């Protein structure tokens, strides 16, 4: 639309991951495969946790929240990415871009909060097993989940409002395959220093505080495990944390690389590569990680997929 002598941007062009024609089909096939795997795996985990009474515990309640989140998280960016790979017109409306940005950061920050909540659950279960039922009761679990989703929503809403209020009147070519804060700030026709600092400070605060909580939980868990004389008991206790630790490494490793460094052209190009990991690959791997390392989840998934005959044989 027109405003004085300047033209306001009404849509953006997403540059995507690559322009190489010979890589488009490969990228489309791999992305689609991971996306379908993410939808299937996470929906199965949510289903088994809801339908299996013996999984109605705090750990699996939080896991179901994480799987539901991953189901939605990949759906925020991947369908549009698949469409753009096979399309000549890679545009998204201004409103659509802001909505995508909001839900991407809403779900991404909520995941950090949920991972921290899950680490607290493991700390209580291993270090205070006799008080576990009292501390991690139903009300506490619901509050942890609500707190995680609420903080994620407020964090994202703050950045969404700040970004939506910026004037975009020059280039509309977003150096990414989805709408994210940093590439959009590069397109604003005003000084964005304060916005960039807020992204680093606020995102850093959320990421570092949740990571610190996870780190402290595992320091206490590690200290407690060292006091257990039986190697079998120690291994059994640690096995309940292995899946969570693996997911934490994937999530925070990519998040720190993306959002806690200065914005440059090279960093934006690297961010596109890193973003494939936490938007496409990680949501698909999370259910596999939990299924392979957790016997209860594995048994319940087999029961759901193959029926009671397999369950009886187990």
Image (cartoon, grey):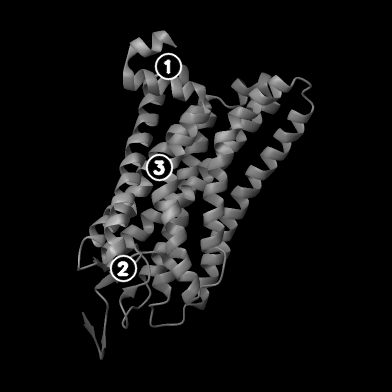
- Along the line of sight, the residue nearer the viewer: 310 or 134: 310
Instruction: Pick whichever of labels 2 and 1 is earlier in the sequence.
Output: 2
Assign a secondary structure to mark 3: helix
Give the alpha-carbon distance from disc 2 to disc 3, as whole Å: 25 Å
In this view of the protein, can residue 153 be seen by the observer?
A: no
User: To which quarter of the image does residue 125 belong?
Assistant: top right
In the image, what residue occupies the spot 48% across and 37% down? Answer: 145
Pointer 3 residue? 284
Q: Earlier in the sequence, mark 3 or mark 1?
A: 1
Compared with residue 44, is residue 35 higher up or lower down, i.e. above or below?
below
Q: Provide the residue designation for mark 1.
A: 53
Q: Is 307 situated left or right of 211 in this image?
A: left
**CB under 8 Å between discs 3 and 1:** no
Foreground residue, 287 or 141?
Answer: 287
Instruction: Looking at this view, name the residue that lies furthest to the front.
Output: 22
Residue 211 image position (x, y, % from top left)? 61, 49
Element under disc 2: loop
Residue 102 horizontal/vertical position (percent): 37, 57
Count of marks overlaid on the render: 3
Direction bottom: furthest residue? 5
Q: Are marks 2 and 3 in contact (CB under 8 Å)?
A: no
In the displayed structure, would residue 255 be above or below residue 112? below
Q: Nearer the viewer, mark 2 or mark 3?
A: 2
Measure how far apart labels 3 and 1 are at the Cα level: 25 Å
Count neighbours of disc 1 (C-alpha within 10 A) and say few if under 14, some if 14 to 19, many if 20 or more: few
Which element carries disc 1, helix, strand or loop? helix
User: Residue 20: which disc?
Assistant: 2
């Amino acid at each position: 639309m027109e405003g004085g002598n300047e033209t306001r941007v009404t849509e953006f062009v997403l540059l995507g991951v690559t322009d190489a024609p010979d890589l488009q089909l490969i990228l489309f096939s791999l992305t689609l495969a991971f996306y379908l795997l993410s939808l299937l795996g996470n929906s199965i985990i949510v289903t088994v946790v809801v339908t299996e009474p013996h999984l109605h515990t705090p750990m699996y309640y939080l896991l179901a929240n994480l799987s539901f989140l991953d189901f939605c998280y990949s759906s925020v960016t991947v369908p549009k990415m698949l469409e753009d790979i096979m399309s000549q017109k890679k545009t998204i409306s201004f409103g659509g871009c802001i909505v995508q940005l909001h839900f991407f950061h809403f779900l991404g920050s909520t995941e950090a909060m949920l991972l921290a909540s899950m680490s607290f659950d493991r700390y209580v279960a291993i270090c205070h097993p006799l008080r576990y039922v009292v501390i991690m009761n139903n009300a506490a679990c619901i509050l942890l989940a609500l707190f995680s989703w609420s903080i994620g929503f407020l964090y994202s809403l703050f950045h969404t409002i700040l970004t939506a209020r910026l004037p975009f009147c020059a280039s509309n070519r977003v150096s990414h395959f989805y709408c994210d804060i940093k590439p959009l700030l590069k397109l604003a026709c005003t000084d964005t220093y304060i916005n960039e600092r807020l992204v680093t400070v606020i995102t850093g605060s959320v990421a570092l505080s949740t990571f610190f909580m996870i780190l402290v939980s595992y320091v206490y868990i590690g200290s407690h495990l060292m006091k257990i004389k039986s190697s079998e008991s120690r291994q059994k206790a640690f096995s309940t944390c292995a899946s969570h630790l693996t997911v934490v490494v994937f999530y925070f490793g990519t998040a720190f690389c993306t959002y806690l460094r200065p914005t440059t052209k090279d960093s934006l190009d690297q961010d596109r590569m890193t973003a494939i990991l936490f938007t496409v690959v990680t949501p698909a791997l999370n259910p596999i990680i939990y299924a392979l390392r957790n016997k209860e989840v594995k048994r319940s998934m087999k029961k759901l997929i193959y029926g009671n005959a397999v369950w009886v044989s187990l």
